Amino acid sequence: MSKPRTLIGRGRTMSSCFSLLLQAVLATGVSSTMDSPDEVVDALKQAKEVAVAGKFDEAELIASKVIREHPKDPRPQVFLGNLFDVRGKHDDAIAAYTRAIAIDAKSAEAYDLRGSAQFKRGKFKESVADFDHYLELRPLEAPGHWRRGISLYYAGKYAEGRDQFKKYEIVDTNDVENAIWNFLCAAKVDGVAKARAAMLKIGKDKRVPMMEVYELYQGKLKPEDVLAAVEAGEASDGERKLRRFYAHLYLGLYYDATGDAKKAAEHMNLAGGPYRSPQYMGEVARVHMDLLAAQAGK
């Protein structure tokens, strides 16, 4: 899924992720008592370059030094939080974003990023609350905030989640994933049959095998048709892996929605395991995989 001005979205490379983050960090509100904003900007640019090169420990040291020298500036805390988040240290990320918010309660990006980190930790209600704070500060971002919709689904707020994905049509009517998540929320409220009849209309999602996924949820194709589309034609190893990830993610969600827990776990274990994407939807697969495993263990 995608949205305008997203900080952590589908299809972002590490370099573009940090570049977008840096733009957001530099736009974050700053206390009027901060004495050397240019020095902070320069240091964070350096930290970004180091992080993009994979030298996370060095980037963390740079950000920590800026924090010591400019304790009233929330921006290095936001940057440090993202460094932790990229490394899977979500509790540390949440703590850094929380410190940024304590410095500046209007740091919209800190709320948004903390909402994502909360989701990855399985704290769904807290994630929704942070996204809501973000949208209070950035109301124009509301229609495109698909991450909020996903958190609403896992928080059990299905009607609200359905509405969130419905609003996304303002942003994009060619995103199969949006229609699927709208369906998943609706199925929890009205049942699969009614949700299928009310599925959002999609133009053309060019990603393989998303149109086959859409027709599966419509009841027009079978799961094997989705898998066949993944393996058809030429594709690089990376592209093939990404296709397999999306196929197994949405097959897992499909079987979960239609009541086949065994097949849901089978496909989600592939999406959250060997085919896992490094982007946000890969975290969704991991979270769902862990939830299914916990349910099976009860």
Image (cartoon, rainbow, N blue to C red):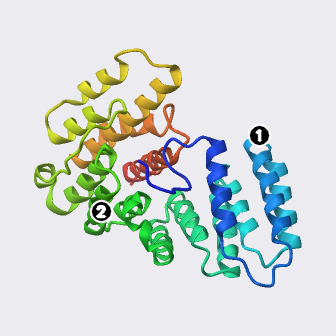
In this picture, is 159 found above or below 244?
Answer: below
Q: Earlier in the sequence, mark 1 or mark 2?
A: 1
**Where does label 1 land, which residue?**
53
Q: How many marks?
A: 2
Q: Is residue 274 visible?
A: yes
Task: Say which residue appears at 27% left-offset and 34% top-offset.
Answer: 211
Q: Secondary structure at mark 2?
A: helix
**Residue 171 coordinates in the image, percent (x, y):** 35, 56
On screen, residue 101 versus residue 214, left or right, reads right
Q: Position of residue 263 (x, y in %)?
A: 30, 37
* Residue 92 can be seen in this image: no
What is the x, y in percent for residue 285? 44, 45
Location of residue 92 (image quadrant): bottom right
Q: Which mark is residue 222?
A: none
* Amino acid at dot 1: Ala
Q: Which residue sits at x=26%, y=60%? A: 166
Q: Characterize the local packing of mark 2: few (<14), some (14-19) or many (20 or more) Cα atoms within 10 angstroms.
A: some
Above or below, comparing residue 209 to residue 118 in the picture: above
The three-letter code of the residue at mark 2 reads Lys
Distance from disc 1 to disc 2, alpha carbons, whole Å, reads 38 Å
Q: Quadrant of the C terminus?
A: bottom left
On residue 167, the disc is 2
Query: In this rendering, is residue 294 above or below 35?
Result: above
Q: Would residue 110 appear left or right of 120 to someone viewing this image?
A: right
Q: Residue at x 33, y 51 (%)?
A: 172
129 lies left or right of 254: right
In the image, 222 versus 22, the foreground residue is 22
Q: Residues within 10 Å of mark 1 (few under 14, many from 20)?
A: few
